Amino acid sequence: MKDRIKKIIASAAIPAMLFSFAPTVNAEEAAEPYSDGMRQITTMDLVREMGLGINLGNTFDTCNVNWIENPTVSSFETAWGSPIITKAMIQGYANSGFGVLRIPVSWSNMMWGNYTINPDYMARVKQIVDWTLETGMYAIVNIHYDGGWWSRFPAEKDECMRKYTRIWQQISEAFMYYPDKLMFESLNEEGGWESLWNRWSGSTDGKAESYGLLNEINQKFVDTVRSS
């Protein structure tokens, strides 16, 4: 068992907590480009080291762009006005003093049957993460709004949880041997469902049920990543 450990970050909708796991590797896997184990530092030291962050928005989090014919990775990447991201742009963030780049992703943009993420889409996100880590910055990868399928969780919990789990299984596999400077964010800001609890009403009716579902989703996230 080698000390290859990944940190994962829970949803911003709940207090941030970091978790880790140590997968077994063989000789072939040891040839992965990232061989550093988890550093023995506290969560507070890690957060201080991260410093200022910036969002790579309107890029891989584009969604609901059904007008695209014969979509490619780049057609989604540029659909909301972003240019094609280059290594020089990522280096520019680091040169400007940023310590962490958050990479929001709508994974449903290019997805096949059984919620299988298009390998070209995954490879492009992976490339951006590689460029980010090469600068010394932290990287955060999440499931972003993703077209809004989150809203169906209360009524279609089993199917939504299956999709959610499948996505995180594939992300975990793709980034299994990355260092602790890559973090995962369970979800963006979709945790909370007005069909269960209207947070603006002043009432607590349904609040426990809404938070309970959110906690269940985040626990599935932790279990899925740790078991990868």
Image (tube, rainbow, N blue to C red):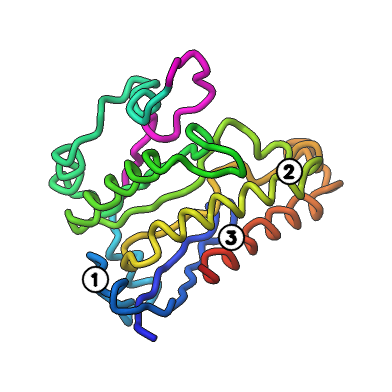
What residue is disc 2 on?
153
Q: Distance between the residues labelled 2 and 1?
A: 40 Å
Q: Is the magenta stretch mostly helix, strand or loop?
A: loop
N-term mark: 1 or 3: 1
Q: How far apart are marks 1 and 3 (CA)?
A: 27 Å
Name the residue: 83% across, 43% down.
203
Amino acid at the residue labelled 2: Phe
Amino acid at the residue labelled 3: Phe
Name the residue: 44% across, 60% down.
173
- Part of the protein shown in magenta: 52-70
| Percent coordinates x, y for residue 48 in the rendering | 31, 65
Q: Quadrant of residue 77?
A: top left
| Comparing labels 2 and 1, the label whose residue is closer to the camera | 1
Name the residue: 24% across, 56% down.
133
N-term mark: 2 or 1: 1
Q: Is residue 207 left or right of residue 114?
A: right
Q: Which mark is residue 131?
A: none
Nearer to us in this view, 226 or 183 = 226
Amino acid at the residue labelled 1: Ala
In this picture, is 64 found above or below 181?
above
Q: Is mark 3 on a helix, strand or loop?
A: helix
What residue is disc 1 on?
31
Q: How crowded is mark 2: few (under 14 residues within 10 Å), some or many (20 or more)?
A: some
In this picture, is 130 found above or below 26?
above
What residue is disc 3 on?
221
N-term mark: 3 or 2: 2
Name the residue: 32% across, 49% down.
126
